[in-house]
Amino acid sequence: MAGIVVVFDFDKTIIDVDSDNWVVDELGATDLFNQLLPTMPWNSLMDRMMNELHTQVITIQDIEEVLKRVPIHPRIVPAIKSAYALGCDLRVISDANVFFIETILKHVGIRDCFSEINTNPGYVDEEGRLRILPYVDFITSPHGCNLCPPNMCKGTIVERIQASIPKEGKKRMIYLGDGIGDFCPSLKLMETDFVMPRKDFPAWNLINKNRTLVKATVHEWTDGEEFEHILLQLINTITVEESQLLSVEYCKFQTMSKATHGALPQALPVPY
């Protein structure tokens, strides 16, 4: 199994758009959304918009149908399936919400590829209305990071993932993202890790302006084809390096065993 954790942003990384904006626009609520945007935090605004849609008799099924036609590059799903088949531990860290993300991932057949989805809670209440809440309560429990939006610090989540990985496993991380919120987690990566910012998007701009702060190796990408090619190439590179390291360690072990116990005995012939 590959000793690799691959962490994906969702909006404009796995899918080609912002899922919140996609739902609002497709259901005809853009004007009200833009009117309310300056007046409240994003998560509160999305929760309010779901209430407005509910009052207009737009059902959960209507929202699901909109999510199922979200644009996604044709090479993204095969890339994720390949990374999973190669034994990578795949996770999502996103400022979208769990209802949107899981609906889309299930629809395209890759929900089971991910061991963990870190995002804002979303659930259907007893009245059939979709509720959306912040990942952390930034009023009572602020995360204290000035690089991230108040409801979620992706860097803190990456640090938690790093701390949960057994040190003897020596797992390496690949992080893919596009937005401003993906800059902070990029700063948490180690020298042996890789970060894949989407070219000409905010995370890419911030990384290029602050290269000395980023320890991980940077590989930019522009579309789904490059996403797939670079991701699978990095997985292969890490796998080859790990195999070579294991070979070196085995040779060292053999050398030490010979020095301590003499030549290792030859295998006995198998009797017939």
Image (cartoon, rainbow, N blue to C red):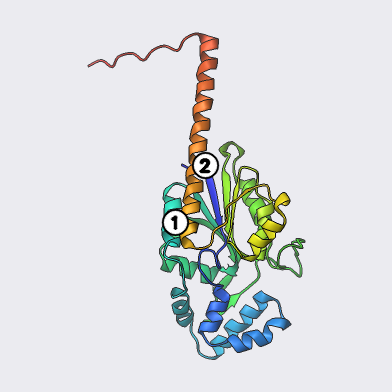
Question: Mark 2 is on which residue type?
Answer: Ile
Which labelled disc corresponds to residue 184? Answer: none
Residue under the image location 53 percent in, 91 percent down? 56
Name the quarter where the C terminus is drawn. Answer: top left
Question: Where 68 sits versus 55, above or below?
Answer: above
| Residue at screen point 53% across, 88% down | 28
Rendering quarter of residue 260: top right
Residue 127 visible here: no
- The picture places residue 98, in percent across and down from the top left corner, at 55, 68
Instruction: Of the two numbered discs 2 and 1 on the same chain, state the one appearing first in sequence.
Output: 1
Q: Image height check: is 189 above or below 118?
A: above
Residue at 50%, 32% in the rendered image: 244
Left/right placement of residue 133 relative to residue 4 reads right
Local crowd size for mark 2, using a 10 Å CA cut-off: few (<14), some (14–19), many (≥20)? many
Q: Position of residue 165 (x, y in %)?
A: 59, 44
The amino acid beneath tag 1 is Ala
Residue beneath the point at 76% across and 64% down:
142
Whole-angstrom CA distance, mark 2 to mark 1, is 16 Å
* Residue 43 in the image: above or below residue 54: above
Q: At numbered mark 2, what does the secondary structure look like: helix, strand or loop?
A: helix
Q: Position of residue 180 (x, y in %)?
A: 67, 65
Pointer 2 residue: 238
**125 in relation to 216, above or below:** below
Q: Residue furthest left?
A: 272
Please give left or right for residue 269 compared with residue 224 in the image.
left
Residue 53 in view: yes
Q: Which residue is mark 1?
A: 79
Q: Residue furthest top?
A: 262
Q: Residues within 10 Å of mark 1 (few under 14, many from 20)?
A: some
- Secondary structure at badge 1 equals helix
